[in-house]
Image (spheres, rainbow, N blue to C red):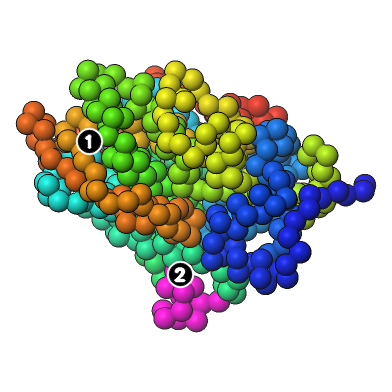
Amino acid sequence: MTTRIPPGPRLPAPLQHLMLVVSRRQSMRAFRRRYGSAFTIRPLTGPAVVLSDPALVRQLFLTSSDLVGNAELNLGRVFGPASLLGLEGERHHQHRKLLAPPFYGQRMQSYEAIVEEETRREAASWPEGEPVEVLPPMTRITLNVMLRAIFGSDGPELDALRVLTPLLTSLGTRLFLLPLPRTDLGRLTPWGRFNGYRRRFDAAVDALIARAQADPAFADRHDVLSIMLRARYDDGEPMSHQDIADEVLTLLVAGHETTAGTLAWAIERICRHPSLLARLASEASAGGGELRRATILEVQRIRPVVDIAGRQVLAGSVRLGEWEIPHGYTILVGIHLMHSDDSVFPDAAAFNPDRFAGVRPDRYAWVPFGGGYRRCIGAAFAEMEMDIVIRTLLRDFELDTTGEPDERWHSRGISFVPAKGGRVVVRRRAAAAPARPVPSSAASCPVPPSAATSPVPPSAASHPVSQRIVA
Ligand code: HEM
């Protein structure tokens, strides 16, 4: 098969690598201006074709998982062999079918009260009339929500994970980008520290597993941990505790930092557009939400916290439009490149939520959650969570800008967040509901057994392989 790859910079690989590490977004934009919506880069990690044309992205996302797999450089390498991010083929499909249902369909409604409660708990201590940096509280809200969804409970038994998850997130998302051998040379080295945190994380998950299995109501529980514990592979074997810990870590990391970063951007963007802010506040007090949901879509378009989704060519070659990409090449979807292209989104630099009023965006042009058989399994959950957090803040507070200029992008390894953490000035509304302590009865995620859910997202539903792991 003759290969035909897009053109790209001829700079030496070490220089290209450095440019991508130091200023990935700017370098990518410069390459797109020079070479168009498909170009090839050659960093030290190997050649990669970068796409920002929705037609080519559509073709890529619809390509069979036998022909393209996840990018070799992915977080699964750090989070363990059973991490959804690193799994391929049948095992990836099995885990996805198991883990997706709790994050889809009617089950979302059962989490709304938890999200509102966590938001009020955090915002209770915000000072009035002076700048508040929202990223840290958003990170705690999204982590607590994810912990409660996974373990179906809340309380001191989750404290160890509340401490260890941010440490593993921040170290893991940086380590996977560094070409360091995975040698553990003691507590003072990065991998040594990571492995130490991981051992403590696994011990905490083991304790939570024992607690769940000792629960007389275990058979009726619908939290993610119980679903994994009851699952059986084809051969009747359950998931090992190590496999479960890999997936718990993956869900916690993938599910909290991205959502928190997007929320911080949402607040940063909204507060710099006073007339939009006024419309959102009156819509929230009237019980509506269409403009708010359009605003979240627009925030994710203009400030996508994850700027690329990667794949690897497994077949001899893969045809995308006029290009024939050879085996072993990485293919990157330039999420931010596509979202900032005027030919894809007219007047792309303008923050204009009305562009999404009453319409769902094109699923191959608006891709903050990636696409195809690896599309984010938490997309619906994240959308629900962001909607409820923003609704609660709009109802409880008058939000105001600090008068500071737009915040710059700051890289946290995987995600891009507002450099100053999304600073905003808040004042409590007179009628705001007071913050409530968490009653233990409300602390679990009550999911009725009858809750009918779409078992898998549309992308996974079209996967040809039958379900082989039984929940
Ligand atoms: C605004 C919030 C979020 C953003 C922007 C986001 C973004 C992404 C992106 C870009 C991918 C890669 C998709 C691809 O390769 O095509 C991904 C995958 C993934 N996300 Fe999210 N995500 C978010 C929230 C969540 C949440 C709440 C969860 C947990 C429920 C989650 C769990 C995952 C998992 C497990 C994967 C791997 C899927 C696979 O490889 O099959 N994410 N996410």
Q: Earlier in the sequence, mark 1 or mark 2?
A: 2
Classify mark 2: residues with Cα within 10 Å, few (<14), some (14-19) or many (20+). Answer: some
Circles 1 and 2 in contact, beta carbons < 8 Å: no
**Which residue is at a point 70% across and 29% down the rendered structure image?**
464
**Which residue is at a point 40% across and 33% down the rendered structure image?**
296
Q: Which residue is mark 1?
A: 393
Q: CA distance from mark 1 to mark 2?
A: 38 Å
Boundaries of the magenta span: 183-194
Q: Answer left or right for 166 relative to 79.
A: left
What's the amino acid at mark 1? Leu
When asked about the image quadrant of residue 46, the answer is bottom right
Assign a secondary structure to mark 1. helix
Q: 308 above or below 236?
A: below
Q: Which residue is mark 2?
A: 195
Q: 379 above or below 449?
A: below
Residue 357 at what x, y percent from top left? Answer: 43, 21
Q: 397 above or below 14?
A: above
